[in-house]
Amino acid sequence: MELLEPTREAFRLLLTGDAQLWYIILTSIWCSLAALLLISPPAIAVGFVIAKVTFPARRTLVVLIQALLSFPTVVVGLVLYMLLSRQGPLGFLRLLFTPEAMILGYMLIAFPVLVVFALAAVQGADPRVYETARGLGASRVHAALTTLFEVRFGVMAAVFNGFGRVVSEVGCSIMIGGNIAGLTRNIPTAIALETSKGEFAQGIALGCVLIVVAVGINAALAWAQGRGGLE
Amino acid sequence: MRLLVCFCLSMASAISCFAGDDVRLATTTSTENSGLLKVIVPLFESKYGGKVRVIAVGTGAALKLGENGDADVLLVHARPLEDKFMAAGFGSVRRDVMYNDFVIVGPKSDPAGVRNMRDIIAAMKKIAGSGAKFVSRGDESGTHQMEKRYWKEAGIGARGDWYLSAGQGMGQVLNMAAELAAYTLTDRATYAAYKYKTGLQVLVEGDPKMFNSYGVIAVNPQRHPGVNARGAVAFVDWITSAEAQRAIAGFTINGVQMFFPTASSRSSLSSILPLAAALERSVSAKGPTFFNRPSLVSRY
Amino acid sequence: MSDWLFAVEGLDKRFGDRVLFKDASLGLEAGSGYVLVGPNGSGKTTLLRIVAGLEPADGGRMALRAQSVRAPDYPESWRRDIVYVHQQPYLFRTSLQENLGYGLARRGLPPDDRRARVHDALKWAGLTASIKVPPDKLSSGEKQRVALARARVLGPTILLLDEPTANLDGVARKQVLDLLTELCIDNHTVVIASHDPEIIRLAILNRVRVSGQRITVDE
């Protein structure tokens, strides 16, 4: 199978601003970033609370959330579909087959990832951090923020992980978005389409584009992280 | 003791040779969704004495599997692509098998007003002009190729907010059409078999241009020595045999026949003819057609 | 309770089956220094943490000036007045200045004012030369000095120090002892838990014995 030519062609389209390809890329980036921006604060907060606060059934909750990590994204898509469909309780919102619905799906998928990683990061924090902050007069919220800042690498890892999980997923995107050209088609669903057409090399070329985009975004985040504080 | 083991092993391998290796059949998702294969494949398997592995993918992917030698025999319905496949030497033999037909389905309310129209091209023009939504397969499948041919003949460049190119299988596209109260082109069998299509009805049918012809192709073993050529040819021979053709005709959904056998004499390699003309000939030559049977709209 | 700056009365505290305090009391006078002495595990650290609001008491009352609460309540406003320093203090993973200015920033002090106070604090701790050093690279003695300065710069009503010279010896210990002496002389109200004989011997500190579930002030 000839791989070099389709890959070269894919990057040529990328660099010459081919509208179709760029629309696919921007849909991927926009939906994934928007979802993460929206779900990160609540998810990280939940992770923090579970790590720091003892309450009944805490361990059960942790087990449940960790189990959600193994949940196939296509099932998330199916459940969301049942809710958003005309026949479903939220059908009146007419959200099905829109980018907004995909963002909603991504938020659900990223949530357990973010919680579990944030939880681990906070549990790994020095127990004196929170108390030191409180001892110096910080409010509970601010002491929490300071703690998260101290384990910021773990928290960033949580966000990177969440981003990776949603920008590469197909099952939910196709069910909820519908892979509609120019509207809800992102890179992974486009790859699925090319594969079903037998255009395997095209699929791989798009995959390479996705990797380049992902590297770019992660590099930008790492750069911002480095500028933000001392290593 | 060792002699006994060797004897048993050689008998076992001889029997398995006799019984036949797996036949990998690549076909389209529409064909699989119709349920036809679930009925006829077991008939072949008992004759052949081996298993058939059905790989249902998009039309393009099915042909690609044949090109790569990852499938032994193909059952698809995209005549121009099949001809290209044969011309390139990827297949050793091709035969007509059957045809079914496409229909236009849409919302009960029929905003474009195409119900009961007999001219598919005029109906497509009307849908495009009405502003109602149309969902396309958008995946170079057999259905999509048909749809593109209609737009071309109607002189319409299908794009805009009303035209949704979904890039998915027929089932999902029907789903989408039901959800969005849109029109779409579908093969009758997939539509009949599909459960989740509330609100859709068959609105346009019967135009000879909507007939969809299926071909079976045995992958050329000279290109890929690893293919099960024996099994492939056995399948081709069987599916064009009188027994199989009867089984195909006997396959019904809700009591309605879905597929119409077209295997002619046992000569290999069909000639390349424009689709509509070939189908018109076979339609007028054979038995019940969609012209002279009662309207099926009310059934759905 | 009215003369005391801070008082705790009828204090109960237990960890599981172990009773640490039963009906214990302590009063702190403004401007006085106290050193908590007692055997290991007697509750010196726990007492400091209860006063700091890091550990809830099981029973009793506490009062800061005129405000009195019943355990386990602890008013948020008290955290502005009462500052606690860990035995091995934690410095945030940021610059020295950010560490020193942390409490000031939480109290809403604008950056310019903060800068001046932080600079003074650095000088007081004798660490102006180490200004560029990442906090986790400092020695234990230096960290303790930063922590003391970080607490002092807030002008706390009550300063609670847990074993400030534990794990220190030689020059480092001397430097921290000097700072401690300054804190006590400066008319702060300081409570130090320690078994360092040099701290216990400091004349200006009142000795408070913590043992046997009770708290007693030595005369």
Image (spheres, rainbow, N blue to C red):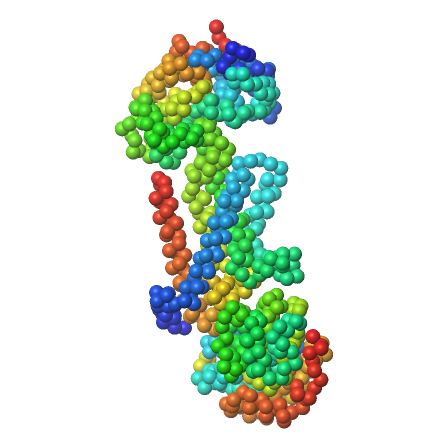
| Above or below, comparing residue A53 to residue C190 in the picture | below
- Displayed quadrant of residue B173: bottom right
Asked whether residue C29 appears in the rendered view, the answer is yes
| Residue nearer the viewer, C49 or C104 | C104
- Residue C173's spot in the image, x, y percent? 34, 20
Task: Count up the numbered dots.
Answer: 0
- Residue A144's spot in the image, x, y percent? 48, 36
| Above or below, comparing residue B14 to residue A112 in the picture | below
| Residue nearer the viewer, A155 or B12 | A155
* Residue shown at 44% from the left, 50% from the top: A160
Task: Report the side of A26 relative to A45 (left or right).
Answer: left
- Displayed quadrant of residue C133: top left
* Residue shown at 57% from the left, 15% from the top: C9
- Residue C128's spot in the image, x, y percent? 28, 27
Asked whether residue A83 appears in the rendered view, the answer is no
Looking at the image, which residue sits at the far left? C129
Please identify the quadrant where the C terminus of chain B is shown.
bottom right
Looking at the image, which residue sits at the far top? C219
Please identify the quadrant where the N terminus of chain B is shown.
bottom right
* Residue shown at 47% from the left, 41% from the top: A121
